[in-house]
């Protein structure tokens, strides 16, 4: 049984990590093409607009991850009709949210550009990026839901193919729109917005298979089921939204310390962070389907093995990733510094080497939070996510920036993740002890 668990772990995690890396790579492609085709102002505009993208993507992850985790548990205990009601209700919630986001894109993009800190120099580019992202928000929401359901329905290979295909499309058309067609930042965001449409077309092939376990049914939306799923998905929303808010706060702090060049340097660090965290989000999303399934079956031993594999994998990746980033900080930064600005180069290199000392702590925090989500324990997962994002990160950044300037800004991420890692480990062992004391089987 342990050998089978290891094989399944490798299958789900490897394909999920590749999927998440595919998504992060098209964000990196945006950064690379914009920095070379639009310049430092374009890079600043992209970084200022990322919080809006994080909000949209976070809502999709909340609905998708939470509902799909509940779906994986229900498959073992409930009938097909109940699963259909859950899926249909989740799609309905996505439609409602999508309409709200589209309306914001049509009527409030200007105000949102000002809200995220755009000045006259980059205002037009920020406004355009925000508007197009919001207009494509229904595609982002539905793509997240379908991707999570397909992966939890035993088809991680199709999920991986869909996400990578969307990313490849985005990378190719990023280049076409920005360089041959000279569409600037509008071209970049148009390619990004179209990518989830391509992904959904491939994910829809899952419905042609005889063994799929979810589909739309004729029913009234079950608000209670949506809320229960959303409760499990809140950590994913908090992670995405808080990352966007943290970027906004970092932008404002760095603007006061180093100006637009400093924000551009942080843009390099932030986009590399998206790739690094994609690895850990991939591990987390990979272990979620088998963890939820085994929870539904009541199989404690398998949950222990899967969780152990995930923590070991996270720590191994931490050593590899930090070694690569710290050792290659200068050439990596140079890729995004087309103007060869020495101030930008020095700030970004320093930032990479300090900021990413957080990698082992962040990886463990993500794994523990996903474990709680997968085993139907939303509250401790929400605590971990809130501490990582809003409660500790933003005050740490402000205090350390005031005390140590730009170095303090870079230090805020590792300091926060280290503190949260201690708390997360404490929550894990506390829940384990309480479950054994009460006679429940969960680790």
Image (cartoon, grey):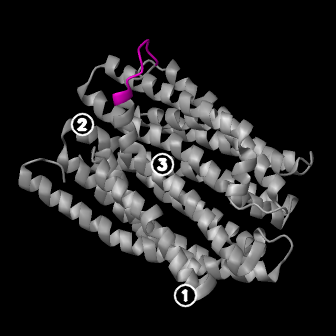
Say above or below: 351 vs 134.
below
Mark 1 lies on residue: 403
Estimate the x, y position of residue 436 in percent, counting from the top left.
10, 54
Mark 2 lies on residue: 296
Estimate the x, y position of residue 176 in percent, counting from the top left.
86, 45
Say above or below: 304 vs 418.
above
State how far apart marks 1 and 3 are (Cα).
31 Å
Residue 323 in view here? no
Image check: 167 left or right of 160? Answer: right
The quadrant in which the C terminus is found is bottom left
Residue at 20 percent of width and 63 percent of height: 429
Image check: 372 left or right of 154? Answer: left
Q: Are marks 1 and 2 in contact (CB under 8 Å)?
A: no
Name the N-terminal-most of marks 1 and 2: 2
Dot 3 alpha-carbon crowd within 10 angstroms: few under 14, some 14 to 19, many 20 or more? many
Q: Nearer the viewer, residue 58 or 345?
A: 58
Magenta residues (range): 216-224
Residue 296 in view here? yes
Q: Nearer the viewer, mark 1 or mark 3?
A: 1
Residue at 80 percent of width and 71 percent of height: 337
Mark 3 lies on residue: 237
């Amino acid at each position: 049984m342990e050998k089978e668990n290891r094989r399944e772990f490798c299958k789900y995690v490897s394909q999920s990590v590749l999927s998440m890396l595919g998504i992060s790579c098209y964000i990196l492609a945006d950064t690379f093409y914009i920095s070379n085709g639009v310049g430092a102002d374009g890079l600043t505009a992209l970084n200022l607009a990322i919080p809006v993208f994080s909000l949209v993507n976070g809502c999709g992850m909340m609905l998708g991850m939470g509902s799909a985790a509940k779906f994986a548990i229900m498959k073992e205990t409930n009938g097909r009709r109940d699963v259909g009601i859950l899926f249909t209700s989740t799609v309905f919630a996505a439609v409602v949210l999508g309409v709200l986001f589209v309306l914001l894109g049509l009527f409030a993009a200007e105000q949102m550009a000002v809200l995220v800190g755009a000045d006259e120099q980059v205002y037009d580019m920020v406004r355009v990026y925000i508007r197009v992202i919001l207009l494509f928000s229904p595609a982002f929401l539905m793509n997240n839901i379908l991707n999570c359901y397909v992966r939890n329905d035993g088809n991680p290979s199709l999920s991986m193919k869909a996400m990578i295909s969307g990313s490849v499309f985005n990378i190719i058309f990023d280049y076409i729109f920005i360089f041959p067609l000279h569409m600037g930042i509008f071209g970049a965001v148009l390619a990004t917005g179209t990518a989830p449409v391509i992904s959904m077309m491939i994910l829809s092939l899952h419905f042609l298979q005889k063994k799929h376990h979810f589909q739309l049914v004729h029913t009234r939306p079950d608000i209670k089921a949506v809320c229960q799923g959303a409760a499990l998905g809140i950590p994913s929303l908090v992670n995405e939204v808080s990352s966007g808010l943290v970027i906004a706060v970092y932008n404002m702090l760095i603007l006061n310390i180093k100006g637009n060049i400093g924000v551009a340097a942080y843009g390099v660090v932030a986009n590399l962070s998206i790739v690094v965290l994609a690895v850990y989000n991939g591990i987390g999303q990979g272990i979620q389907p088998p963890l939820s399934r085994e929870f539904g079956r009541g199989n404690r031993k398998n949950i222990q093995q899967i969780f152990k594999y995930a923590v070991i994998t996270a720590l191994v990746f931490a050593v590899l990733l930090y070694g690569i980033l710290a050792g290659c900080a200068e050439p990596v930064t140079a890729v995004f510094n087309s103007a060869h600005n020495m101030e930008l180069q020095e700030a970004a290199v320093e930032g990479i080497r300090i900021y990413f000392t957080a990698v082992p702590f962040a990886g463990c925090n993500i794994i523990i939070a996903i474990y709680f989500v997968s085993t139907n324990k939303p509250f401790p997962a929400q605590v971990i996510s809130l501490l990582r994002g809003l409660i500790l990160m933003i005050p740490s950044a402000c205090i350390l920036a005031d005390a140590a300037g730009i170095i303090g800004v870079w230090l805020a991420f590792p300091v926060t993740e280290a503190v949260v890692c201690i708390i997360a480990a404490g929550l894990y062992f506390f829940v384990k002890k309480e479950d054994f004391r009460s006679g429940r089987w969960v680790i």
